[in-house]
Amino acid sequence: PGTALSLLFLLNVALVVTWVLLLAVTLTYRHDWPRNAVGAAVGWAAWVVTYRCWYRWPWSPGPPGLG
C-alpha cells in the first residue's frame, strides 16, 4: 500500500486506542461508578455488535474498505 494509506491506517489505530483509553478513564475516575460501568458496557457492546456481528451477516455491506 501507499504511504497515504499506511498513514490513514495508523491514524485509525490511534483513534481506536484513544477510544479504549477514554472508555477506561471514564469508567475509573467518575463519581457514580455503577452508572459509568453500564455506560462502558453499552459502548463496548455497540462496538462488538458493529464489528463482530453486523459486518459478518450476508446482507451487510461488509467492513469499511471492502468492495
Image (cartoon, rainbow, N blue to C red):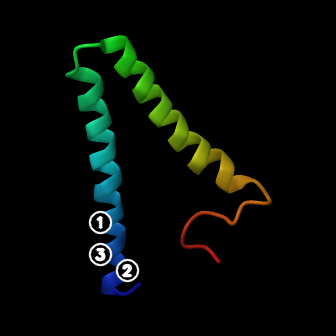
From the image, tell me which residue sits under label 3.
7
The numbered disc on residue 11 is: 1
Numbered disc 1: secondary structure: helix
Taking the spot 67% from the left edge, 50% from the top edge, the residue there is 54
Left/right placement of residue 30 relative to residue 53 reads left
**Measured from the top left, where is residue 62 in percent x and y?**
66, 64
From the image, tell me which residue sits under label 2.
5
Quadrant of the rendered structure where residue 38 is?
A: top left
**Measured from the top left, where is residue 19 in percent x and y?**
32, 45
The numbered disc on residue 64 is: none
The quadrant the N terminus occupies is: bottom left
Cβ atoms at labels 2 and 3 below 8 Å apart: yes
Taking the spot 33% from the left edge, 41% from the top edge, the residue there is 20
Residue 10 higher or lower than 56, as above or below: below
Q: Residues within 10 Å of mark 1 (few under 14, many from 20)?
A: few
**Measured from the top left, where is residue 36 in percent x and y?**
35, 21
Query: Distance of mark 2 from mark 3, alpha carbons?
Result: 5 Å
Taking the spot 69% from the left edge, 66% from the top edge, the residue there is 61
Quadrant of the rendered structure where residue 9 is?
A: bottom left
Q: Residue furthest bottom?
A: 2
Left/right placement of residue 31 relative to residue 34 reads left
Residue type for callout 3: Leu
Compare marks 2 and 1 and give the one earlier in the sequence: 2
Residue type for callout 2: Leu
Cβ atoms at labels 3 and 1 below 8 Å apart: yes
Q: Nearer the viewer, residue 32 or 21?
A: 32
The quadrant the C terminus occupies is: bottom right
